[in-house]
Image: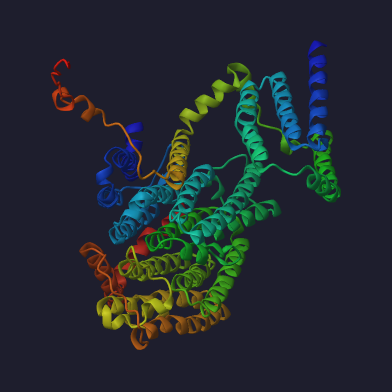
Amino acid sequence: MIKELIFYSFSSVLICSSLAVVLFRNPVYSAVSLILSFITSGFLWLLLEAEFLAIVLILVYVGAVMVLFLFVIMMLNINKETEKSSFNSVAPFAVFIGLIIVAELITIIWINSSQFSTSSTVIQQSSQMGNTLLLGTELFTNYILDFEIAGFILLLAIIVAISLTLRPRKNLKTQVASEQINVDPKKRMKLVDLKETK
Amino acid sequence: MLINELYFILPELIITSCICLLVLINSLAKNLRQYSGVLIGSAAMMACIFVSLILFSENSVDIFNNHFRVDNLATGLKLVTFITTLIVILGTNTDKLNADSEIILIELFAVLGVLILCSANNLLTLYLGLETLTLSMYGLVASKRSSEIATESAMKFFIQGAIASAFFLYGTSLIYGLYQTLSLTIFSNPDINNSIELQLALAFIICGIAFKFGAFPFHSWVPDSYQGSSNSVALFISTVPKIGAFALIYRLLITSFIAVTEFWTILILVLGLMSLIFGNLIAISQSNLKRLLGYSAIGHMGFVLIAISIGSLEGAQASLFYLLIYILMTSVAFMCLEVLSNKNRSIVTLSDIKDLNSSHPWIALIMLFSMFSMVGIPPFIGFYAKWIVLSELLNAGMLSVSITAIIMSVIAAFYYLRVVWYMYFEKTELPVMQKGSTLIQKSTLSIIGVMILLMGLYPSPMIDFCKSIISPFILID
């Protein structure tokens, strides 16, 4: 009972915030309501005992992707009026796509074809040991090679991004620690015995 | 167990450790960086050539939970990759611009991607290899960052590449939905039935492959990125990634998905014919030498694809032979441009090479070898490449395709010979006068230039090599 109560409250928040994403005129408000909808769908994952997906959804989408969105929106400084007019012209197409997705969901849920059922062994294993542990062991045993390659792809991305954007300044002054340590104080400072002036 | 597996991925390990070493050297010892790339890169390639020669005698093994296959084809293609990269690295200018943009380091990453593609036995590993290769190619094309045209072409390339990757991934996801597995060993089972869903998935995957080859509907990045990138980069991206594309097409289509051979041969045939026709026809009107070579590359890829579309092992052998010869000829052509260019003047248009014969007679002669070979004039190796592909086409009874290929080769002769005309018979006020290239570059160029002629006189070792790495044993098991 309590579980259903939680589910319905979160899903109503999710529906409201998703509608708000589309209906708000100000793009910043839309982005913030998208964050809210990500967080609530994260909670829905938690109700399904998919804790890894929930955490990844919040960390990746809220923590990284949406922050990037907000940065872009604020930097571009989008005009609200043009945004409103473009919404109307796209609306019929968007409704059409939405109807297709609804039809697909109906096919999957009500007709419930056996093609879409996941293999039972995965579900059993994940209920025994928790899906984070299961994913981790799979990643570090069966998929170790792919994991390592993915690591190298990230290294490549870092190197390319830095080499494309780093522009060292010509008159940059930097510290050289070894020279600083090896400095002889006698060469740097000359003590002069000043006579008392009358 | 694990130690045994590491022995088979020794070439990859050498490349990855050299990448790490190069990153450290370039960031810590700044005064070495101008030569560190060339030194470490060529040392790594020589070590890898040695190791893969040893691995060549091993039996085929599947390691890392069947994600990685080391067989004759993989080792053979890797060997070709290492040799090509060694030539490319030795031919690259060691000026400050190249060192600052980390060209050799990113090239090593691209080589790693090609190696993974050569050995991948799982669609996930295959995709990761593909991404490593493509991502480093974006970086290479964009590396001339002060130039507007380079940035523009890199941006175009990036967007098209992202779309092609999305196509490829979509096809992969359809296949996973159909069979709940990504392992290529399972798909090579002829019991897999020929369904419309599988054909759809394969069509998406072939879009991804066509992009990597630069075949017709996905070809527009090729001339743009050749033109936009510096000569050193164009030398690399016109040669090494094509080996990865061949590995991709061989692993995915020829040894897996045997059940739908009739379907994919038609797709590949159409792609090949269209790129043959479009590449060669558009190349006629080009005045930029690099764009011209880009369109001619599209035409050559058409030849490679129609040879694959025969669908037999002989077709694949002919295709591989053509690809290797194409790599040799293109690397000679681009290396001529690279040797002639220096920091102050880059050779890009046809009018830049006017009267090259009187200022650099030897380089002009080598460029002439390359151009004659691309046309397919008999004493040069390009003739044998075209001849083998055409004879396989005729054996398979594809008469109209081979006639189209011959007509297109004749049309192609016009623009290749125009390059020769400009070098020998045009007069210019602004001759190429430069002294920037090193002795290593010139001797590498001379060796591979003379190779075009020598291999044309004695082509059988190369043909035997192609036959030995694509052996009929693969189809039996």
Residue sitting nearer the eye, B351 or A169? A169
Residue B458, image x, y percentages: 28, 75
Can residue B50 be seen?
A: no
Residue A182, image x, y percentages: 18, 26
Give the residue displayed 74% in from the left and 37% down from the top. Answer: A27
Above or below residue B48? Residue A190 is above
Residue B324, image x, y percentages: 38, 65
Give the residue displayed 83% in from the left and 39% down from the top. Answer: A102
Residue sitting nearer the eye, B278 or B74? B278
**Quarter location, residue A126:** top right
Above or below residue A186? Residue B187 is below
**Quarter location, residue B380:** bottom left
Residue sitting nearer the eye, B171 or B359? B359
Residue A26, image x, y percentages: 77, 36
Can residue B179 be seen?
A: yes
How many numbered discs, if any?
0
Q: Would residue A66 appear left or right of B108 to someone viewing this image?
A: right
Q: Would residue A28 appear left or right of B12 to someone viewing this image?
A: right
Give the residue displayed 60% in from the left and 61% down from the top. Answer: B264
Above or below residue A189? Residue B93 is below
Quadrant location of the N terminus of chain B in the rendered image: top left
